[in-house]
Image (cartoon, grey):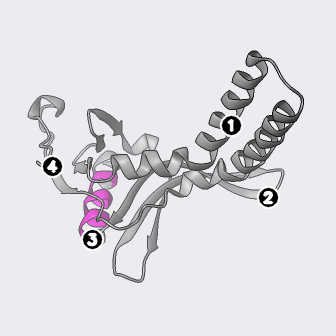
Amino acid sequence: MQEWVLDSSYLDPGEYVLWKGKPEKGRLIDPNAFVTVPFGIIWTAFSLIFLGVAYTGKASILVWLIAFLFLFVGLSFTFGGFIRHARTQGKIQYYVTNYRLIVAEGEDMSFYTPDDLPPMKIRRYKNGNASILFARRYVGSQGRTYAPVCVLENIKDVAGAQRALSTMLRNEAE
């Protein structure tokens, strides 16, 4: 795969790249996908029951189409996040400049200024890699909950990324 290079036209005057990186191969689990999995399992079970009723009750073609549509929706809730995550793996690049964090996913780019980012949290893995999470904490009905704003996932040079992010955050404070 050819590495995506940040075009300087995306940088403001005086802005330069402090660090760049990409997720390492191997982690196919998107932590955000787990939110939809329980709902997807219940939806899929309901749609299978619906299909069973349609099969035993000599249902019309419209009922069959609706039942298969429900099944497709349930399966996409259950497995869609994992499939999307696997498809984007290898197409993600992270750039930390002296003013912003830039996340390029294929043709899409997201820009985060220090004002957009909550406190940094680092999650280390056994293989030495780590993910840097920026998540807002709020109190929901189940207690403390975290809503991810941005994640630099499964990076090898976490110390370099953390230093660059700290520099970016300090530059904004000055």
Q: Nearer the viewer, mark 2 or mark 1?
A: 1
Few, some or many residues within 10 Å of mark 1 (<14, 14–19, 20+): many
Q: Nearer the viewer, mark 2 or mark 3?
A: 3
Q: Which mark is residue 143?
A: 2
The residue shown at (33%, 53%) is 89
Question: Is residue 168 highlighted in magenta?
Answer: yes
Q: CA distance from mark 2 to mark 1?
A: 32 Å
| Secondary element at tag 4 | strand
Q: What amino acid type is highlighted by mark number 3?
A: Lys
Residue named by callout 4: 17
Q: What amino acid type is highlighted by mark number 4?
A: Val
43 sits left or right of 92 in the view: right
Determine which quarter of the picture holds residue 67: top right
Residue named by callout 3: 156
Give the x, y percent position of residue 110. 35, 36
Q: What amino acid type is highlighted by mark number 1?
A: Leu
Q: CA distance from mark 2 to mark 4?
A: 39 Å
59 sits left or right of 38 in the view: right
Q: Nearer the viewer, residue 100 or 94?
A: 94
Q: Nearer the viewer, mark 1 or mark 4?
A: 1
